[in-house]
Image (spheres, helix red, strand yellow):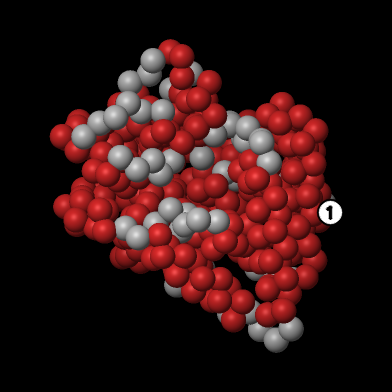
Amino acid sequence: MLGTFTGITPGIHVNTLASLLRGFGLSAVVLFAMGLTHTFLDVVPSTFLGVPDEGTALGVLPAHRLVLSGRGLEVVRIALIASFLAVLFFLPLVPLYLLLAPLYRPAFGKLVVLLLTLLLVFTERGVKKVYALFIILLSGILGLFILSLPLNEPFYALFTGLFGVPVIVSSLLAGTKRIEPGSPELEIAPKRFVIFSFMGTLFGMLASLLPAFTASQAALLGSFISRDERSFLTIVYSVNTANFLFALLNFLETGRERNGVVTLMEPLSVKALPAFLLVALFVGFAVLLYGEHLARLLAKALLRLPYRFINLTVLTFLILLALLFDGISGLLALTASSIVGYLAVILGVKRTNCMGSLMLPALLIR
C-alpha cells in the first residue's frame, strides 16, 4: 500500500516516505516491498502528469508523446511488464552479480560516464553539437550547485525542473485541450520487448555496480540503441526496477548502500536473499495484476478534466511541494532547473543532454 501510494502520487518518492516512517521500525522486507512497488507504479505520474523521479526522468518525453496520441495506457502496460520481466531476469543473474560486486573500482564508473558524455555530444548534428555541450555543462554546473546545498530533496528540484516542468509548460503553450487514455494493447513485437527489457536489466545491473553511473544514465544508454518510443520506454522501466533489485543485492553482499531505501535497512547478509527473492516475485505478480486497473481508473478520472486545468494544477502542486520540502531554497532550485530544461527545448537538442546534471558531478566528485 505504501509503495502504491508513493508510486501514483506526483512528487512523493518512496525514499521520502520511508524516511518519514523511520521511527515506526519497518522491517527490511517491508521497505524492500515498498521500493519495488514504487518502481512498477511511478509510471503513472510521469506519464499522465509529466512528473518524473530520478529513475523515470528520461521516460517523461516519449511517454508524454504517446499520451498525446491517445496511448497512455499502453505506456503503463509497457512499464508494468518491463518491470516484471526485470524481476524474472534478475533471478538468473544473481550468481554473476555476486562475483562482480566485490570487484568494483571507482574509475570504472567515471570512464563509463565520460564515454556517455562524449556520445551525447557527437550524436547531435552540426551546430547542435555545440548546443548539446553547452546544455551538458550548464546542467552539470547546476547539478553541482544544487547537490551541494543543504536541501532535503535535491533530486526532486533537479529532475522535476529539468524534465517535468518543461513538459508541462510546453503542453500549456501548445494548447492541448483534452486527451484519451486509449487502449493498453502493445504496439511492439513481443520478441523486441523481451530483448529490450533484458538490455534494460543489464544496464540496471551495471548502474548498481558503479555509483558514478546512475540508473538515469543507464537508461540513457538505451537512447543510443532503441529507435522508437516503445523500445526506449521498455529499457527505461526495466532499468528502473533492475537497478533497485541489484542495489539490494549489492547491499547484502558488500554492505554498500546504493539507494535511499537500502540506507534505512538494518545490516543484513546474503543469507537473507531467498526471502527477498520470494517477496520480489510476489510483489511483481501482485502489481502486475492490479497496476493497470488502478492506472485506468486514475487516468479516466484525470482526463475528464480539461488538460490545461490538469497542467496548471500539477504545476502549482509541484511549486508547493518544492516549498514544502525545502522552502525558498527549494523553489529557487526548481526554478533554475526549469530554466535550464526549457533552454534545451528552445535550442532544439535532446533533453537527455540535461543528464549532465549528474554526469559532471560524477566525474568531478570523488
Q: Quadrant of residue 93?
A: bottom left
Q: Quadrant of residue 134?
A: bottom right
Q: Residue at x 54, y 29 (%)?
A: 16
Left or right, 362 with respect to 93, comes to right
Judging from the image, what secondary structure is the residue with disc 1 in?
Answer: helix
Left or right, 139 with respect to 56, comes to right
Please give the count of numbered marks on the rendered protein. 1
Left or right, 335 with respect to 258, comes to right
Above or below: residue 289 compared with residue 65:
above
> Which amino acid lies under the numbered mark 1 shown in the image of this protein?
Leu
What residue does disc 1 label?
Answer: 173
Q: Position of residue 169 (x, y in %)?
A: 79, 50
Q: Position of residue 146 (x, y in %)?
A: 68, 46
Q: Nearer the viewer, residue 270 or 94?
A: 270
Q: Residue at x 80, y 41 (%)?
A: 332
Farthest top residue in view: 24
- Is residue 280 visible from the viewing direction of this image? yes
Left or right, 290 with respect to 174, comes to left
Disc 1 residue crowd, few under 14, some 14–19, many 20+, Cα 10 Å: few
- Is residue 219 visible from the viewing direction of this image? no
Q: Position of residue 54 (x, y in %)?
A: 55, 47
Q: Residue at x 70, y 86 (%)?
A: 126
Quick one: quadrant of the N terminus?
A: top left
Q: Quadrant of residue 157?
A: top right
Q: Nearer the viewer, residue 52 or 183?
A: 52
Q: Position of residue 190 (x, y in %)?
A: 33, 61
Farthest bottom residue in view: 126
Q: Residue at x 19, y 38 (%)?
A: 270
Q: Nearer the viewer, residue 338 or 193?
A: 338
